[in-house]
Every structure is written in C-alpha cells, then in structure tokens.
Image: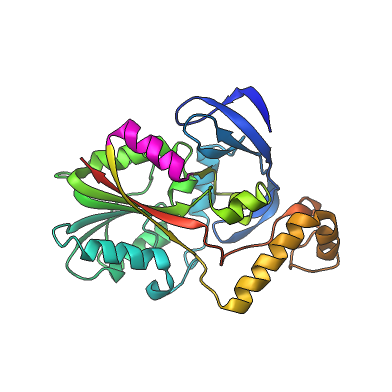
Amino acid sequence: MSRESETACPGCGSGALLIGPIPGSNSFAGRQLDTVLPGGKLWRCSACNLVFRYPRLAKKSLDELYREGHSDSWPEPAGNRADWRIVKKILDEHPNLTRVLDVGCFDGRLLDSLGSQYEKLGIEIHEEAARRAEMRSVKVIGRDFDKLPVVQGGVDAVLAMDVIEHTEDPMAFLAKLAEIVKPGGLILIGTGNSHALTLRLMGIAYWYCHIAEHISFINPRWVDYTARELGLDKVALHSFSHGGGHVRQRAREAALNIFYRMAPTLFARFRQLGAGHIDVTRFPELNKVPPYWLTARDHFLIVFRKI
C-alpha cells in the first residue's frame, strides 16, 4: 500500500493508506442503472482505522439515487434477519426503553417486529417506503439521516441497521445519534465489519465494498476509537451473517470468491462467456465485479450506551 497525503480521513482528518481501486457498478439501492457508476478507491485511515471510498459521488447525487430506488427492495421476513433478532433481544432485556427511533427505517418492518409496547419513530428518505412505514404505526419524523431533527425529550434507543456504511463521516453520524438519545439510552448500529476474515482475505475484491451506495466501512478498532472520542460506553459487539444460507450455498459462495481471488483473469473469462448474469458486453467495466458472499460472517452489531 502507498501513502497519498492529499487524501484525508473524512472523520478524524488523519492521513489515509491506499488499499486499491474498486470496480464500478451499475446497480444502486436494488435498481439496475443504464450507466456504470465509478468505483473510486478504497482507503484506510492510519489513526481511527476507518475504511472508506474516495473519490465518491456527492451526497446530492446519492440522495437522488436513493429516492429512485425500489420500494419493494429487501423484502425478507423479520425472522430471517439475524440483526433484527439481536435488536429485539437487546430491547426485550431493557423494558424501560420504550421510545425507539429507527434511522433508515425503510418500510418500518423492523420497528413493527418489536411489538406494540414501543413508541416508534423513523427517518426515511424514500417516499413510498416512508408511507408504508406510517401504515405500520411508525411516526416518520424526518427524511435525511444527515439532518436529524430535534426530538423533544429525546429517545430511549436509536437503531441504525445497514445505514452507517452509507454515510460519508460515520463518526459525525454517530455523534448526531448520541445527541438524540437520553442519558443511559442505547445506540444500536448494524453494518459490515471491515476486519472480518473474509473481507481481509478479499481486500478490494469484496462484494460489500463494491456496492455503490456503500462508502464507509467500520470495524472494532474504529468502534473503540470513536467511543473514546464521543464519550460513549461500548456495551457489546455481536457478529452475524446477513445471508444465513444452507451448507451448500455457503460452500458455493466461498468457492466462487476464492476462485475470483486466486484467478481473476480466468474468472473474468467465464463471466464473458455468460456466467454470473452480468452483461459485460454492454458494460465491459463490470468484468471485474466480485461475486456476492452473502453467507459470510462479515457483519456485526455494536451496542453503545450514552453515559
């Protein structure tokens, strides 16, 4: 890896180490695009250890793409979501935490799965998804996770599942969440772990980093650093797989990724022959797109307490 002094961490401002280029993508928020979005490069901060994409699309462009996403994306039942099960278990252990805000609530299914004993608040940029959340008795109080509204009286718990990887400055995002939470309240963050074994094995050639809307990637070292900086108590870390899957699916995805890692040129040749359902004739830039590894244990859920 090489150092380029002109690239600074968007969070702590320290210098960053270049990991390498990220392949472009023609999908965003569950929708296929007519053009390929540039991948940019992957960097690692030398101080807080944040891994981030740079250059990246401007927030205005990202917001427009989010609004155009499909409202029926990510339709898994609540019981299939390992992170949602962890969230419910944690909140069930704290019956005094009854006012809950879900940042990036989408259609409100996570809040709905918690039960009727909660006052449910949400932030959601997608208009149709927000409408569906309100049909599930979620009070949508804002549309932009970067411009969180003042919540009178605060909330007992804030949830942000699969959101922090979409933020340009995860430390600033976490600080905003902490402002909303009452003292003694909890902040639950679910996201990919950039120190997961599979991600370290694949480097820039990893499916999670390739997703165009993912621009920041945290890890346990970043969590410790940021908790100290913001004066938060790190309560727990829970590792999980976002995809689950049977033994055959896990073996298949592992084999495909190792094949891609060890023989990328040969893998690309198979893709040119039609494997992988990617139109590399129309979009030759996609020839280097990594295969998915949904069954990898590469996610974690962090529990912070506001002191």
Q: In this view, does 9 lie to the left or right of 228?
A: right
Between 64 and 21, the one nearer to me in the picture: 21
Measured as percent of width and height from the top left, residue 190 is found at: 41, 54
Measured as percent of width and height from the top left, residue 213 is found at: 55, 49
Measured as percent of width and height from the top left, residue 141 is found at: 27, 50
Measured as percent of width and height from the top left, residue 215 is found at: 54, 43
Between 57 and 228, the one nearer to me in the picture: 228
- Any part of residue 162 in sight: no
Between 255 and 113, the one nearer to me in the picture: 255
Q: In this view, does 290 lie above or below 148?
A: below
Q: Is residue 230 magenta?
A: yes
Q: In this view, does 157 lie to the left or right of 286?
A: left
Magenta span main SS: helix
Q: How is the rendered protein coloured?
A: rainbow
Quadrant of the snapshot with the N terminus: top right
Magenta-drawn segment: 218-231
Q: Residue furthest top?
A: 5
Q: Is residue 256 magenta?
A: no
Q: How many labels does the image show?
A: 0
What's the residue at 43%, 73% (across, down)? 80
Q: In this view, does 267 lie above or below 45?
A: below
What's the residue at 51%, 45% (across, down)? 217
Quadrant of the snapshot with the C terminus: top left
Image quarter of residue 263: bottom right
- Any part of residue 89 in sight: yes
Q: Is residue 292 left or right of residue 104?
A: right
